[in-house]
Image: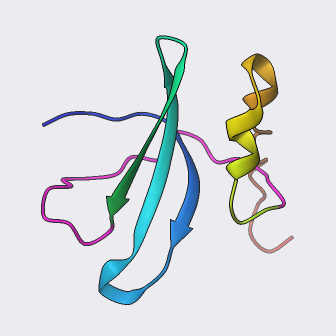
Amino acid sequence: MQIFNGTVIARKNAGNRSAFTVRRIVAGEGVERTFPFHSPWIEKVDVKRRGRVRRAKLYYLRDRVGKSTRIREKVPTRKGE
């Protein structure tokens, strides 16, 4: 088993072929990996943080460097208010 931490930059909804793309920086190089949702090789997916963005695909993060790649934290709200 290998753990791959990173930011989800895309999600593709296509039935059994649905997938999501995760990006992270390794040794100064950007690494992206696409995982199928329904793969038997994926044991579990942990969501560490949720961010507030205004785009469905975050491909613009590929061109950014350093602190500009950070995503604003989503502020949890109480239900019913």
Residue closest to the eye, 34 or 78: 34
Query: Which of the colour schemes (rainbow, by chain, secondary structure, one colour) is used?
Result: rainbow
Q: Position of residue 58 (x, y in %)?
A: 70, 52
50 or 27: nearer the viewer? 27
Nearer-the-camera pick, 44 or 17: 17
Q: Is residue 65 left or right of residue 46?
A: right
On the picture, is 14 further left or further right than 66? left
Task: Report the quarter where the C terminus lies.
Answer: bottom right
Residue 21, position as x, y percentages in the image? 47, 54
At 79% from the left and 62% from the top, the residue drawn is: 55
Report if residue 55 lies within the magenta region: no
Residue at 48% x, 80% y is 13
Residue 49 vertical position relative to residue 31 in the rendered view, above or below? below
| The quarter of the displayed image where residue 41 is located | bottom left
In the image, is residue 51 part of the stretch drawn in magenta? Answer: yes
Span highlighted in magenta in the image: 37-54
Query: What is the quadrant of residue 65 in the picture?
Result: top right
Q: Position of residue 5 (x, y in %)?
A: 42, 33
Query: Which residue, as the protein is rendered here, is positioned at the far bottom?
Result: 15
Q: Position of residue 14 (x, y in %)?
A: 43, 85
- Vertical placement of residue 73 versus 9, above or below: above
Left or right, 71 with reference to 22: right
Residue that extends furthest to the top in the rendered view of this protein:
27
The front one of 11 and 53 is 11
Residue at 77% over, 30% down: 64
Q: Is residue 78 above or below residue 70?
A: below
Quadrant of the image for the N terminus?
top left
Q: Main secondary structure of the magenta part?
A: loop
